[in-house]
Image (cartoon, grey):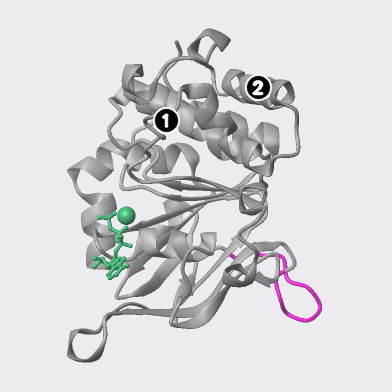
Amino acid sequence: MNRTLDQHAQTGSDGQSEDILVDVDHISTVFGQGASAFSVHENLDLKVRRGEIMTIVGGSGTGKTVLLRHILGLTKPSAGVVRINGIPAHALPAEGASARMGMLFQHGALFSAFNVLDNVAFALREQDSLPDAVVRDAAIVKLQMVGLKPEHALRMPSDLSGGMIKRVALARALIMDPPLLLLDEPTAGLDPRGSDEFCELLLEVHQELGLTVVMVTHDLDTLYALSTRVAVLAEKKVIVEGPPKEVITFKHPFIEQFFLGERGLRALEPAPVAKP
Ligand SMILES: Nc1ncnc2c1ncn2[C@@H]1O[C@H](COP(=O)(O)OP(=O)(O)OP(=O)(O)O)[C@@H](O)[C@H]1O
Ligand SMILES: [Mg+2]
């Protein structure tokens, strides 16, 4: 049983939460076969409410990226089911996937052979139903939304800074206006200032677009800047979930080491988001 520290979940008359967008319903994930089989998730349960920023933390190799891939519908758990808006994620058609959710991948690669505009426009262009000028305009609007200028549109990924690459990847994830955004280590590789600026941008788009966000991060500043709630993955399941300040009071060796080590206590200090 995992423990939920947040007592404010809305429950309907049938006892089910009414505002759940992502329902990870008691999943197990096993890789390999026979003697080499190993399990990553066992009876893992997690509900993400519409409009919140849910942050998943856990040690390296605990299955955070695998969980995001299940939510995306790219992979299917060995048991249990992930539902998006009540529909099994693996059963959703691949077509139109980018209109349902955007994803910022952990190693956030852009298509290196495409310029910025073509990267951002990719999913829209795949629809093959809009005139090129409309696709270009939509991509430029998204570039502006993430703080880039139209003149950046023709640059190649190799000519961009780390922060700009993250912004282009975010614009690409948002091109189809999906209601759900998945972020795998969104600030990894950025310096503290770049990281603060990207957090500020994520907060802006979250509010402006009314997004639901599921984020994986190991960065405590990012976690505290963005999270509505935090879910801690350990022992192959979510051991505790709730608002950050409550989760850190849960007694578990990973939580003590992650949140209450020297690094964790430093991140608890109020740190204003950097202004340009
Ligand atoms: N397709 C696959 N086949 C076999 N094993 C896999 C596959 N995908 C992931 N794994 C294994 O599942 C485990 C969890 O991987 P995952 O990438 O989800 O970890 P993570 O929590 O995201 O780690 P990190 O914090 O380092 O990114 C790892 O042991 C990984 O090697
Ligand atoms: Mg990962």
Specify whether tag 1 is near ligand 2 (CB below 8 Å): no
Seen at 52% across and 8% down, the residue is 151
Q: Amino acid at mark 2?
A: Arg
* Residue 42 makes an appearance in the image: no
**In the image, is residue 268 above or below residue 101?**
above
Seen at 68% across and 39% down, the residue is 177
**Mark 2 secondary-structure assignment:** helix
Callout 1: 10 Å neighbours few (<14), some, many (20+)?
Answer: many
Q: Which mark is residue 142?
A: none
Percent position of residue 69, x then y: 45, 61
In this view of the protein, which residue sits in the foreground, 243 or 197? 197
Percent position of residue 238, x then y: 41, 70
Quadrant where ligand 1 appears: bottom left
Percent position of residue 105, x then y: 41, 46
Location of residue 88 by image quarter: bottom right
Location of residue 36 by image quarter: bottom left
Callout 2: 10 Å neighbours few (<14), some, many (20+)?
Answer: some
Judged left or right of residue 182, residue 126 is right
Seen at 40% across and 39% down, the residue is 186
First to last magenta residue range: 7-17
- Which residue in the structure is indicated by mark 1? 166
Q: Is residue 4 magenta?
A: no
Mark 1 or 2, closer to the camera: 2
- Which residue in the structure is indicated by mark 2? 136
